[in-house]
């Protein structure tokens, strides 16, 4: 009996002793709460935070403390400053916060059990300095002691129990990106426990942008040390307010099986799906260096959809196009990589209507709109994307002010197009180098094959002044003129193989303004062709018959003037081309001439000198020079032999012949008189 009661008696005394100790501890803590004012220790708290984090803590609000059965702390307003080189604005501020820690588990078992944490009005300002360092980095080192260690361990090596977290009316800013009106509700947190989370916020991507409401519901499971979080399904959803009156467009984002490694600063989303209206995007991504130098790599796929219908759902009306079926199909697959500030798309395959665009593109600096690209397009008809042709042309304007988008371009790249349709022309094997910066856009080299020949050129657009300036250099070689003019100007007035060299400048925007300010020089040579719609040989022959016999010949010509070679050059001033060296030559015809072409009005005024070198009829003389005037327009020229001019020429020739005969007779008489 004695052996049994002794241990019992010992346990009793131990219990009494522990109970007494607990009473003493509680009494002491109660006395602390009753007689110690935590507000008196604000300077020490602020000094400790400064030494621990290198940041200034300000506690203007009141502090309330309770110690049993919870250590309860309630803060008024508080701010935490930025590290050096980040300005004077605070890193974070709160309107108020409260925290409770259960006392007995902490005293008896060194186990941290935290009650509900409430934070009101958190305002977090995230930024990077000129050196690329984030103001969220470097906690645990003070400016006075760079090597001071942070809190890297301690008595609690496992994730503490946490009843939950509630954040109301918070704000997080990073550059122009602002997440506002943040309401966050986190449920019970513990090792291996699935934690429910609810989140709502409004996101603005830049100043003045309409806020995008976002809501999220998901569960995550932390490991025992809070170093890795696993998400069964990450789900975000929200809606977009249409620009035009109508129903808001819902969107949702889901990512099953995602995880975050807090120690490594990495995140893995093996698959995600984004729906927005009738668009569906799927993909995957992995992020590293989240808290230091974020890098994200992954891939995405946009399922085929009608771009026009999608924008209609968003309340955005795309411009009408000449082809009503344009912009009705788009699809894309690409790999992507982000490393601040660059975003790179590789293995890009973009399908727009009948065009397939492949290659790479990189936004090297979004802030300066800097980008590079190397793209290959199988075919595209740009004309189908133009606005429908108006019933009547708009009134002509001398100049149009340059637009800002070109001034902001910072672009370098290479574009290859298999088949290109532009301005009615059909080009193949197109290669264009693109360089834009400082308000100047240069397209060079620009090479293409067209109509059996080739084209090389250079285009420079200068947008640095109020009125845009354009310079074009172009060389054509061996081009089928008939096919080119048919497609470009819907006319067949000229045929043959042409070489052309052009160097021109112009100012303004729009066809009328550019034509009216066109200056420069053009030279062309055409071989083995014909002037279509006019038979100069026949017209001149008829004119000679009319002058000699006063009758109009009833024979008709061939309707074309074949030639072996045609050459001409022109000087352009304010849209008017002046030619002084037109030469057309063939086996039985030679034409020289000069004149002007008004490109804005398309009016022409030329005077030709047509020389017949031979005739198919016996009525025409062996040789004849006949002046011909050309008036009308480029589309409908009028060739008119100058009868009065012809008469002067013929009379002059007769006078010269008669003068020669009279001179010969006088010479013979003089010889006889002189006895020779």
Image (cartoon, rainbow, N blue to C red):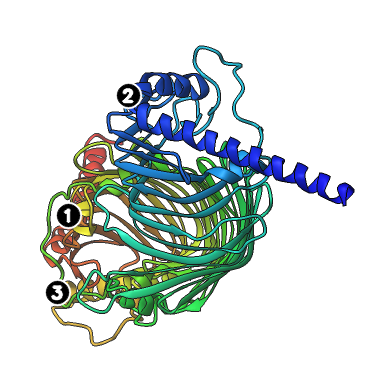
| As drawn, 284 above or below 672 | below
> For the residues marked 1 and 3, what is the alpha-carbon distance in whole angstroms?
51 Å
Q: Residue at x 37, y 58 (%)?
A: 584
Q: Is residue 400 visible?
A: yes
Q: Which mark is residue 392?
A: 3
Dot 1 corresponds to which residue?
A: 652
Residue 602 appears left or right of 111: left
Q: Quadrant of residue 666?
A: top left
Quarter occupied by residue 421: bottom left
Q: Residues within 10 Å of mark 3 (few under 14, many from 20)?
A: few
Tell me the distance, in whole angstroms, between the alpha carbons under discs 2 and 3.
62 Å
Depth order, front residue of 437/647: 437
Nearest to the eye among marks 2 and 3: give it: 2
Q: SS at mark 2? A: loop
Front residue (pair 311, 127): 127
Q: Nearer the viewer, mark 1 or mark 2?
A: 2
Label pair 1/3, CB-CB below 8 angstroms: no
Tell me the residue at 60%/42% (across/down): 19
Q: Position of residue 49 (x, y in %)?
A: 46, 24
Q: Which mark, residue 72?
A: none
Rendering coords of residue 187 (x, y %): 50, 61
Q: Position of residue 538 (x, y in %)?
A: 30, 75
- How many marks do you count on the picture? 3
CB contact under 8 Å: marks 1 and 2? no
């Amino acid at each position: 009996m004695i052996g049994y009661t002794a241990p019992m008696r010992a346990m009793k005394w131990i219990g009494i002793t522990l109970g007494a100790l607990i009473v003493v501890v509680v009494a002491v803590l109660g006395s602390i709460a009753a007689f110690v004012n935590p507000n008196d220790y604000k300077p020490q708290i602020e000094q400790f935070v400064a030494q621990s984090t290198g940041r200034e803590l300000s506690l203007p609000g009141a502090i309330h403390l309770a110690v049993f059965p919870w250590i309860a702390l309630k803060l008024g307003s508080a701010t935490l400053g930025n590290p050096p080189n980040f300005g004077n604005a605070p890193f974070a501020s709160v309107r108020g916060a409260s925290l409770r820690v259960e006392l007995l588990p902490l005293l008896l078992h060194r186990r941290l059990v935290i009650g509900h944490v409430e934070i009101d009005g958190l305002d977090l300002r995230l930024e990077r300095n000129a050196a690329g360092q984030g103001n969220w980095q470097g906690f645990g080192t003070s400016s006075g002691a760079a090597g001071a260690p942070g809190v890297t361990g301690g008595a609690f090596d496992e994730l503490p129990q946490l009843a939950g977290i509630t954040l109301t009316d918070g704000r997080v800013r990073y550059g122009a990106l602002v997440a506002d009106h943040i309401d966050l509700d986190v449920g019970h947190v513990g090792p291996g426990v699935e934690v429910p989370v609810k989140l709502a916020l409004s996101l603005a991507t830049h100043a003045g942008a309409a806020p995008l409401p976002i809501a999220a519901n998901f569960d995550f499971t932390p490991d025992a040390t809070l170093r890795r979080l696993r998400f069964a399904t990450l789900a975000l959803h929200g809606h977009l307010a249409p620009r035009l009156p109508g129903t808001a467009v819902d969107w949702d984002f889901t990512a099953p099986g995602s995880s975050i490694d807090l120690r490594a600063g990495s995140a893995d989303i093996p698959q995600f799906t984004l729906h927005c209206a009738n668009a569906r995007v799927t993909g995957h991504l992995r992020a590293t260096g989240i808290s230091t130098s974020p890098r994200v790599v992954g891939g995405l796929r946009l399922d085929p959809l009608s771009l026009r219908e999608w924008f209609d759902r968003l309340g955005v009306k795309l411009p009408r196009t000449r082809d009503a079926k344009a912009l009705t199909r788009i699809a894309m697959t690409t790999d992507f990589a982000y490393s601040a500030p660059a975003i790179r798309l590789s293995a890009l395959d973009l399908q727009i209507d009948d065009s397939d665009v492949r290659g790479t593109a990189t936004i090297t600096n979004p802030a300066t709109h800097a980008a590079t690209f190397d793209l290959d397009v199988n075919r595209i008809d740009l004309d189908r994307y133009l606005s429908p042709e108006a019933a009547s042309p708009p009134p002509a304007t001398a100049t149009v002010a340059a637009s800002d988008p070109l001034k902001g371009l910072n672009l370098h790249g290479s574009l290859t197009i298999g088949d290109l349709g532009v301005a009615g022309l059909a080009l193949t094997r197109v290669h264009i180098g693109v360089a834009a910066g400082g308000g100047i856009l240069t397209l060079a080299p620009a090479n293409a094959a067209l109509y059996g020949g080739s084209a090389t050129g250079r285009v420079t657009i200068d947008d640095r002044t109020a009125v845009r300036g354009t310079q074009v250099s172009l060389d054509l070689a061996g081009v089928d003129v008939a096919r080119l003019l048919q497609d470009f100007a819907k006319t067949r007035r000229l045929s043959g193989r042409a070489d052309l060299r052009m160097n021109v400048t112009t100012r303004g925007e729009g066809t009328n303004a550019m034509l009216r300010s066109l200056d420069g020089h053009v030279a062309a040579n055409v071989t083995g062709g014909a002037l279509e719609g006019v038979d100069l040989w026949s017209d001149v022959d008829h004119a000679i018959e009319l002058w000699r016999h006063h009758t109009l010949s009833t024979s008709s010509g061939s309707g074309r003037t074949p030639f072996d070679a045609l050459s001409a050059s022109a000087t352009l001033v304010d849209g008017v081309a002046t030619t002084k060296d037109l030469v057309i030559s063939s086996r039985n015809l030679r034409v020289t001439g000069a004149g002007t072409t008004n490109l804005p009005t398309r009016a022409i005024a030329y005077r030709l000198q047509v020389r017949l070198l031979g005739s198919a009829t016996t009525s025409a003389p062996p040789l004849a020079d006949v002046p011909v005037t050309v008036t009308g327009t480029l589309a409908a020229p009028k060739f008119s032999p100058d009868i009065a001019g012809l008469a002067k020429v013929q009379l002059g020739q007769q006078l010269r012949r008669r003068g020669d005969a009279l001179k010969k007779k006088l010479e013979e008489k003089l010889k006889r008189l002189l006895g020779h």
